[in-house]
């Protein structure tokens, strides 16, 4: 049971996901600090002395009826910055690495099956065997060739061509 869990955890996708979550959390803190320290003061300079200047209160005296545009703008900026950094720092380099690995692993010729190997062995053995000799036939003598005859002078073939 523990071996199966270990195999599951050690798979590449699970480890990559864990690294991505940790890095995403850490990077969110960095982006939030940049937005709160740099961008919010710039937005506040447009709308007033603080960021809450970019809000609209629907019912006076009711704080829950306030639309806070600065918070929405801050969230959008956070999202865009995080998405851009994750894409350019993680996704794009990983895609290039995977493309290089795929190019390096060109599929080689397919290995022959057992049936093909056995057929090849059979053919090699057949080509190495000498043709069987008929009884009374001298080694190297073609079937139907009499001893002392030249090749091509078997039965029905006479020296000097066919008889008429």
Image (spheres, rainbow, N blue to C red):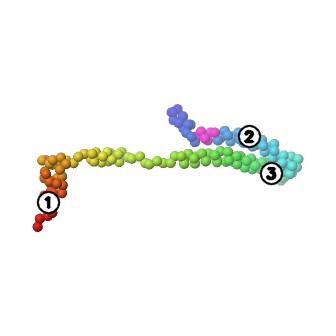
Reading the image, the residue beneath label 2 is 29
| Residue furthest left as drawn | 164
Q: Of the residues tagged 2 and 1, which is closer to the observer?
A: 1
Q: Nearer the viewer, mark 3 or mark 1?
A: 1
Marks 2 and 3, the one that precedes in the sequence = 2
Q: Magenta stretch containing residue 78, yes or no? A: no
Front position among marks 2 and 3: 2
Q: Residue furthest right?
A: 49
**Residue tagged 1:** 159
Q: Which residue does the image show at 50% across and 48% down from the upper left?
A: 106
The residue range painted magenta reads 14-19
The answer to whether mark 3 and mark 1 are in CB contact below 8 A is: no
Question: Where's the C terminus, which quadrant?
Answer: bottom left
Point 53% across, 36% down: residue: 7
Q: Is any part of residue 57 visible from this angle? A: no
Q: Is residue 116 left or right of residue 50?
A: left
Name the residue that disc number 3 marks: 69
């Amino acid at each position: 049971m523990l071996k199966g869990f270990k195999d599951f955890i050690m798979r590449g996708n699970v480890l990559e996901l864990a690294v991505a979550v940790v890095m995403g959390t850490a990077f969110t803190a960095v982006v939030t600090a940049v937005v709160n320290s740099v961008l919010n003061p710039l937005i506040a300079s447009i709308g007033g002395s603080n960021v809450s200047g970019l809000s609209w209160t629907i019912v006076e005296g009711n704080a829950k009826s306030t639309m806070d545009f600065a918070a929405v703008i801050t969230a959008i900026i956070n999202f865009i910055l995080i998405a851009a950094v994750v894409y350019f720092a993680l996704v794009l380099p990983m895609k290039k690495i995977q493309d290089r690995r795929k190019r390096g692993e060109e599929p080689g010729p397919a290995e022959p099956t057992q049936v093909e190997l056995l057929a090849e062995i059979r053919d090699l053995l057949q080509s190495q065997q000498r043709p069987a000799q008929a009884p009374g036939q001298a080694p190297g003598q073609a079937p139907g060739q009499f001893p002392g005859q030249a090749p091509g002078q078997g039965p029905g073939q006479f020296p000097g061509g066919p008889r008429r």
